[in-house]
Image (spheres, rainbow, N blue to C red):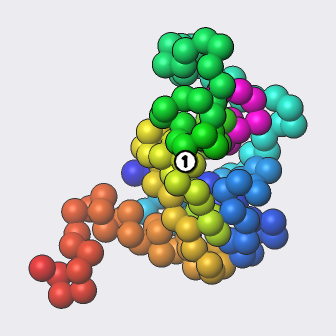
Amino acid sequence: MSYLIAVASLDEKNVDLSFGAAEGFHVYSIDGLEIKKIGYRKLEENKEPNLNNSVQKKISDSLPENVECSERPQCGSGKGCGSGCHGAGGLLPKVELISDCRSLVCKKIGFQAQKQLEQKKITSFDVDCSVNDALTKISAYFDKIDRHISLRKDGV
């Protein structure tokens, strides 16, 4: 079963960008343990990716009109959620950019970003290693899960 992994990296060698700092993601196709780079996806400046109608409707239906983000009870204690679900430039466009990926690898990721990725069923890994090491370990992990092999060393 093949799937995609998005990686936040400046140089394609090290996982060196946080989710928030990434302007785009290197995307790799994984098939079993075989890793192949398929491209780079960059978030267009001042433009959100095309959100499908159900996503747009869900966002707009869940938010009352004329209420600031900082005043919304679901957005925390007066600081706003920072999730970007209330306008352009937030996290939602980045999540939509990689919505077809099984996982995201970055140096650091915030709570709100993790929640948005979870809603899309995207697993996030925050690591401090090379891109190759991260992809090798994550593909081995998913390969075992997909083949229903125990992750424990003793095999139990």
Describe residue 135's horizontal placement relative to residue 22 as left or right: left
Describe residue 83's horizontal placement relative to residue 76 as left or right: right
Describe residue 71's horizontal placement relative to residue 37 as left or right: left
Q: Where is residue 35 in the image (x, y as percent from the top left)?
A: 57, 65
Q: Outermost residue toward the bottom?
A: 154
Q: Residues within 10 Å of mark 1 (few under 14, many from 20)?
A: some
Which residue: 51% across, 64% down? 125
In this rendering, the answer to whether 125 lies above or below 86 is below
In this rendering, the answer to whether 46 lies above or below 121 is above
Quadrant that contains the C terminus:
bottom left
Instruction: Tell me which segment is drawn in magenta.
Output: 85-95
In this rendering, the answer to whether 43 lies above or below 1 is above
Q: In which quarter of the image is residue 128?
A: bottom right
Frontmost residue, 19 versus 2: 19
Q: Where is residue 107 in the image (x, y as percent from the top left)?
A: 64, 69
Q: Position of residue 126 (x, y in %)?
A: 56, 68
**Magenta: main secondary structure:** loop
- Which secondary structure lies at badge 1? helix
Describe residue 26's horizontal placement relative to residue 35 as left or right: right
Give the residue at mark 1. Answer: 112
Q: Outermost residue toward the left?
A: 156
